[in-house]
């Protein structure tokens, strides 16, 4: 028997992409794969252009959904997370925490983000290119690998 709360935290810690789903509040939806990093409270940070479709959606509707899973899992054996939450653009006061969290993550399939830290943070602070966003989970579910059938169960990160 697997501890599902612990498995949920492991999924967040070991993956590098989340699929973000947003809506403009009028019925039009959008999904985007984004690299993320999380803090000790399981808030997930990502960077994006402020005029991207999902960033524009978030200005109208800050409720969003996220899926996190490892696509290398065998068919029928995969487990992943479905998460509801709230997103906000990181304010100037919280940029240092978001930057430290994001740029210190060791992404399993990519370069070490510390190399890009100085120039990227300068651009973020100057407001020229990317913005940090914080996704705060409100509800988390996964398909239960302990069940004989495909059953979705609520899990807790804290």
Image (tube, rainbow, N blue to C red):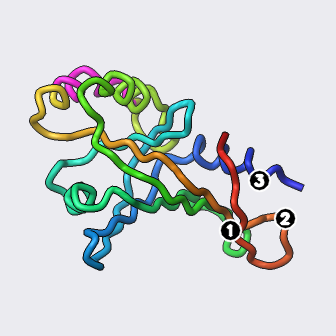
Image height of 14 relative to 80, above or below: above
The Cα atoms of the two marked residues, 3 and 2, are separated by: 9 Å
Q: SS for tag 1?
A: loop
Residue 85 on image: x %, y %: 47, 54
| Range shown magenta | 113-122
Of the pair 7 and 111, the residue shown nearer to us: 7
Q: Mark 3 points at which residue?
A: 4
Can you tell which of label 1 and label 2 is closer to the viewer?
A: 2
Image height of 84 relative to 8, above or below: below
Dividing the picture into quadrants, the one containing residue 78 is bottom right
Left or right of 41 on screen, residue 134: left
Q: How crowded is mark 1: few (under 14 residues within 10 Å), some or many (20 or more)?
A: few
Q: Does the magenta stretch include residue 117?
A: yes
Residue 23 on image: x %, y %: 31, 69
Left or right of 43 on screen, residue 72: right
Q: Residue at x 40, y 47 (%)?
A: 35
Q: Residues within 10 Å of mark 2 (few under 14, many from 20)?
A: few
The answer to whether the residue labelled 3 contacts the one labelled 2, judged by CB atoms less than 8 Å apart, is yes
Dividing the picture into quadrants, the one containing residue 144 is bottom right
Q: Name the residue under label 1.
A: 74
Q: Which residue is drawn at 67% across and 44% down?
A: 10
């Amino acid at each position: 028997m697997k501890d599902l709360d612990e498995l949920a935290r492991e999924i967040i810690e070991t993956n590098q992409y989340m699929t973000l789903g947003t809506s403009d509040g009028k019925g039009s939806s959008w999904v985007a794969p984004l690299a993320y990093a999380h803090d000790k409270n399981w808030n997930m940070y990502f960077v994006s252009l402020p005029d991207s479709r999902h960033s524009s959606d978030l200005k109208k509707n800050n409720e969003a959904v996220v899926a996190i899973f490892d696509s290398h899992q065998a068919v029928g054996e995969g487990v992943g997370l479905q998460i509801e939450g709230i997103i906000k653009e990181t304010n100037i006061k919280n940029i240092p925490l978001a930057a430290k969290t994001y740029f210190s993550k060791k992404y399993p399939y990519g370069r070490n983000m510390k190399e890009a830290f100085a120039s990227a943070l300068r651009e973020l602070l100057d407001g020229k290119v990317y913005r940090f966003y914080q996704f705060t989970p409100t509800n988390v579910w996964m398909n239960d690998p302990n069940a004989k059938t495909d059953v979705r169960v609520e899990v807790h990160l804290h």
